[in-house]
Image (cartoon, grey):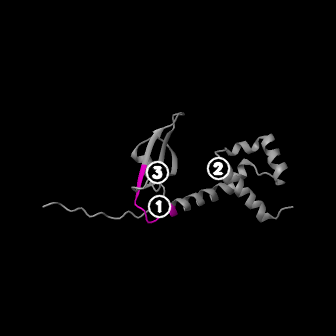
Amino acid sequence: MTNSNSKGDFRQELTNAMLSADIPFWKIENVCFNSFLRKWTGENIPSESTLRKLHLKKCYEEIIRCIKNAIKGQKVWIAMDESIDSCGRSIANFVIGILSNDKEKCKSFVINTESLESTNSTTVIPKSPGFNIQIPRIPIQANN
């Protein structure tokens, strides 16, 4: 019998593994997959709902923390892309990236994706993620 802390750790790691491998949570309900996991881990496998309600937010917070650490002290660019997906829904993606001449350091991250009523400025601005980025003022000098 596992203690409740290791059970929580297992569930959190399972959530993270499924996200990392792009495995949708609904697949945990597959009888064969669920039986396989239960057999080889000796753990009760949480439901899709449990993963989503109790463990997804922790994964999200960890990813945001890693992104903040990656961009800390760096020059960054921020973009918002509006589009319509294949189902006809209006979508906004918020992206942040590191500005650098070094290709290895030039990374970009999708920090938020929102479904919108329509794609226009009145629906996009309220959805902008609160990332608390301080943008320095750049003095502009006129040539005399």
Task: Name the amino acid type tagged 3.
Answer: Val
| Amino acid type for the residue under numbered disc 2 | Leu
Q: Which mark is residue 71?
A: 1
Left-right relation of 141 to 72: left
Q: Which stretch is magenta?
A: 68-79
Q: Quadrant of residue 140?
A: bottom left
Residue drawn at 46 percent across, 51 percent down:
95
Q: Which residue occupies 82% across, 65% down?
A: 3
Q: Amino acid at mark 1?
A: Ile
- As rendered, which of 41 and 45 lies closer to the eye? 41
How far from the left and from the top, in percent, is residue 59?
63, 57
Image quarter in which the N terminus is found: bottom right
- Residue at the disc numbered 2: 19
Distance of mark 2 from mark 3, alpha carbons?
19 Å
10 Å neighbourhood of mark 3: few (<14), some, or many (≥20)? some
Q: What residue is drawn where x is 79% and y is 45%?
A: 34
What is the spatial separation of the Cα atoms under label 2 and label 1, in whole angstroms?
Answer: 22 Å
Q: Position of residue 111 (x, y in %)?
A: 51, 53
Q: Residue at x 66, y 54 (%)?
A: 16
| Viewer-closest of 9 and 125 | 9
Q: Are the residues tagged 2 and 3 within 8 Å (C-beta)?
A: no
Quadrant of the image containing the C terminus: bottom left
Q: Which of the marked residues, 1 or 3, is nearer the chain's N terminus? A: 1
Say whether residue 77 is magenta: yes
Q: Secondary structure at mark 1?
A: helix
Q: Secondary structure at mark 3?
A: strand
First in sequence, mark 2 or 3: give its number: 2
Would you say residue 52 is visible in this rendering?
no
Q: Gap between marks 1 and 3, in whole Å?
A: 12 Å
The residue pinned by badge 3 equals: 95
Q: Which mark is residue 120?
A: none
